[in-house]
Image (cartoon, helix red, strand yellow):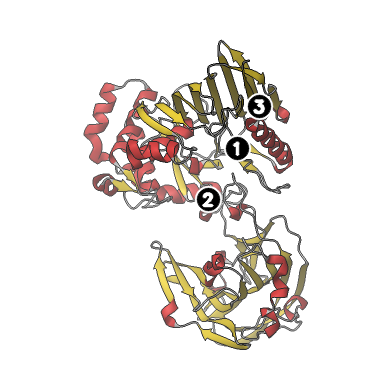
């Protein structure tokens, strides 16, 4: 390291450069406290009537300083936001995450803020006070400094600025250009001396208005080991990125997390090379990460601390001789005795503690699961991943900070592929992974040096809904009869969780009475609630009122309250994928007996529609039966995810389903 050779006492970036890089010499796009009254003019925001707020300017820059014998990464930010609606008040509360480890930490400084209001033509500003600043401790390493600007109203302008000084070179500040609200101007600058090698990853779908890179000389004044002073010239690369008039990111359904799709730039420290020192890699490699994890007290060491369950392990081995049955019994033991506390973690606070207290985070539960699987004679290893709401992984980037979850990977005799297991969900059948982890890939943590440490995280389960009904129509379009409703796969998982939380009565009210037009359910039974390998089934006697006058002609919508009535895909164009997480299937089979004296005059046409490349299929059939009609609708999405290029077909496919389900049957009274 450079600290073994030199002792830096000053570092001038930009200010002390022999050649001032042009990217840094550009005028700053915003000056804190310098507000123009024109920014209150409503005409300037006429195009933003749908937005709750507008980011008028967001400016950040990161550079290095040398303080107290070490480099620090210094980030400065100034932000100005116009509040347009009450829904935008949340923008006045800002969170700044801060990291600390092994005595080093990140510090927030120079925090200041104002709320500006125009009162009777006069500018009134209120200062951010200490009472509006507070700290939340997330865990042993992370805290969040929060502050809320005062007296925010519709029409207010808020402005804040702060600095963050970090001891962690790997934590060079990322920058986000796009948010849920429109952004007029977003600019980020970075100055990086030649000693630091960063990988920069730009993502998103919005174009850059400016992208500059320059190189200049930076003067360092250093103290040699003997105390002599010396000036050293180093090369510094400077960058400037600008986006302007960035639209607000629309929260469309079926995505992982907005972080995966908004326009942003991320930095990753690849390595360092100081004077008279060799290049030192910072990211390491996957085998090194595996070794560190397996040696960690809160990870690998926990796998060997399951001996306190020796009696339970012996009982499982005596009762079950088949490996698959043993694995299922171990998962059930953990599921039954440790309640998941809704915290997704990769590190455990102690598997024994979690078992004895009957509650723990995802790592407590699944590391305990892995240890017990080994105890019953199975080959099991941790598999780490990033959950859907944590963001996608880059397999070419060996960084532990990208991961936040661990699963159990079990290799059964005669099976080439590992079986991924998770014990956090009490209502999940054996081998069923939580929806939140269905995020493509997981990294296998093992002592062996493997060419491919990656496992595919794909669900064998789907979202399955099956419903049958035998209903008697009346001459007003109402009906009564029996409905059998089944939820399987991931639909069953959420249904069972809801049933346990609400109880049977409220479950029926919530899912059938409140969501349907005037339904009455005088009698019902819930079946197979505890048989996790089978669908959750509800049998009901149901009545629904009609709204037609008995004038001899009845216009009847058979799919009302049964089928799809709205297309979830609102945007005409979508630039990012549709990610269901797993395949989906819905089957509805409805039989209607006609009112006495009525006959069919007009039926909808049957339909069979397919997505390209066997991506899905919709079948719709309305056929006469003895004294009635049978309506069958089958919808199948065979893939877990669809690319942006497939979106237009998917949106049209859904539109056709909604249109078909809205069609009416015409019944006419016989002469």
Label 2 CA crowd tier, 10 Å (few <14, some 14–19, many 20+) = some
Q: Which residue is mark 1?
A: 565
Residue in the image at 54% along x and 68% along y? 86
- Nearer the camera: disc 2 or disc 3: 3
Label 3 CA crowd tier, 10 Å (few <14, some 14–19, many 20+) = some
Q: For residue 15, what is the image quadrant? A: bottom right
Q: Quadrant of the N terminus?
A: bottom right
Q: What whole-number distance in Å separates the C-alpha atoms at marks 1 and 3?
A: 18 Å
Residue in the image at 55% along x and 77% along y? 163
Residue 454 horizontal side relative to residue 358, left or right: right
Q: Which residue is mark 2?
A: 389
> Which element carries disc 3, helix, strand or loop?
strand
Q: Is residue 169 visible?
A: no
- In the image as oriented, which residue stretches furthest toward the left? 311
Residue 490 horizontal side relative to residue 242, left or right: left
Q: Is residue 335 above or below residue 220?
A: above
Q: Is residue 495 above or below residue 52?
A: above
Q: Which residue is mark 3?
A: 617
> Which element carries disc 2, helix, strand or loop?
loop
First of labels 1, 3 by sequence position: 1
């Amino acid at each position: 390291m450079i600290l073994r050779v030199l002792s830096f006492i000053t570092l001038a970036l930009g200010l002390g450069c022999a050649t001032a890089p042009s990217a840094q010499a550009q005028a700053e796009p915003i000056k804190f406290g310098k507000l123009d009254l024109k920014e209150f003019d409503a005409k300037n925001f006429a195009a933003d009537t749908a937005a709750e707020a507008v980011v008028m300017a967001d400016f950040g820059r990161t550079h290095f300083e040398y303080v107290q014998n070490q480099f620090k990464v210094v980030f400065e930010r100034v932000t100005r936001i116009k509040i347009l609606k009450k829904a935008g008040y949340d923008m006045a509360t800002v969170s700044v995450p801060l990291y600390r480890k092994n005595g080093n930490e990140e510090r927030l400084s120079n925090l200041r803020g104002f709320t500006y209001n125009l009162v009777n033509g006069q500018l009134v500003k209120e200062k951010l006070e200490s009472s509006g600043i507070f700290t939340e401790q997330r865990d042993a390493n992370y805290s969040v400094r929060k502050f809320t600007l005062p007296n925010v109203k519709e029409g207010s302008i808020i402005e804040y600025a702060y600095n963050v000084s970090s001891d962690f070179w790997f934590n060079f500040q990322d920058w986000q250009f796009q948010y849920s609200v429109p952004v007029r101007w977003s600019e980020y600058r970075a100055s990086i001396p030649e000693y630091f090698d960063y990988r920069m990853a730009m993502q998103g779908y919005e174009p850059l208005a400016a992208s500059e890179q320059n190189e200049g000389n930076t003067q360092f004044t250093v103290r040699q080991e003997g105390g002599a002073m010396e000036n050293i010239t180093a090369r510094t690369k400077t960058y400037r990125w600008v986006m302007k008039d960035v639209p607000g990111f629309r929260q469309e359904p079926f995505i992982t997390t907005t972080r995966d799709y908004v326009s942003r730039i991320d930095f990753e420290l690849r390595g360092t090379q100081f004077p008279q020192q060799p290049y030192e890699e910072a990211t390491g490699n996957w085998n090194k990460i595996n070794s560190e994890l397996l040696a960690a007290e809160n990870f690998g060491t926990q796998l060997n601390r399951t001996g306190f369950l020796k009696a339970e392990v012996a009982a499982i081995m005596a009762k079950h001789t088949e490996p698959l049955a043993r694995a299922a019994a171990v998962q059930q033991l953990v599921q039954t005795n440790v309640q998941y506390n809704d915290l997704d973690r990769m590190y455990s606070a102690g598997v024994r503690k979690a078992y004895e207290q009957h509650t723990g985070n995802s790592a407590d539960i699944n590391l305990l699961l892995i240890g017990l699987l080994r105890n019953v004679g199975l080959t099991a290893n941790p598999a780490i991943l990033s959950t859907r709401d944590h963001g996608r992984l880059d397999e070419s980037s060996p960084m532990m900070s990208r991961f936040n979850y661990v699963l159990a990977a079990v290799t059964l005799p005669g099976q080439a592929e590992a079986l991924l297991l998770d014990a956090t969900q009490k209502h999940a059948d054996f081998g069923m992974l939580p929806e939140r982890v269905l995020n493509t890939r997981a990294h296998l943590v093992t002592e062996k040096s493997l060419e491919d440490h990656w496992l595919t995280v794909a669900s064998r389960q789907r979202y399955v809904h099956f419903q049958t009904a035998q209903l008697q129509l009346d001459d007003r379009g109402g009906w009564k009869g029996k409905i059998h409703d089944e939820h399987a796969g991931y639909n069953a998982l959420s249904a069972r969780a809801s049933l346990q939380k609400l109880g049977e009565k409220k479950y029926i009210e919530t899912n059938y009475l409140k969501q349907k037009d005037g339904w009455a359910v005088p009698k019902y039974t819930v079946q197979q609630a505890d048989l996790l390998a089978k669908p959750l089934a509800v049998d009901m006697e149901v009545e629904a009122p009609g709204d037609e006058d008995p004038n001899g002609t009845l216009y009847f919508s058979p799919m009302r309250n049964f089928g799809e009535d709205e297309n979830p895909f609102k945007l005409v164009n979508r630039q990012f994928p549709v990610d269901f997480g797993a395949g989906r299937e819905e089957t509805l089979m409805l039989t209607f007996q006609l009112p006495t004296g009525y006959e069919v005059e007009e039926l909808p046409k049957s339909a069979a529609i397919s997505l390209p490349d066997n991506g899905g299929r919709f079948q719709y059939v309305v056929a006469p039966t003895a004294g009635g009609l049978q309506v069958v609708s089958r919808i199948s999405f065979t893939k877990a995810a669809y690319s942006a290029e497939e979106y237009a077909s998917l949106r049209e496919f859904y539109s056709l389903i909604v249109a078909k389900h809205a069609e009416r049957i015409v019944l006419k009274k016989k002469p």
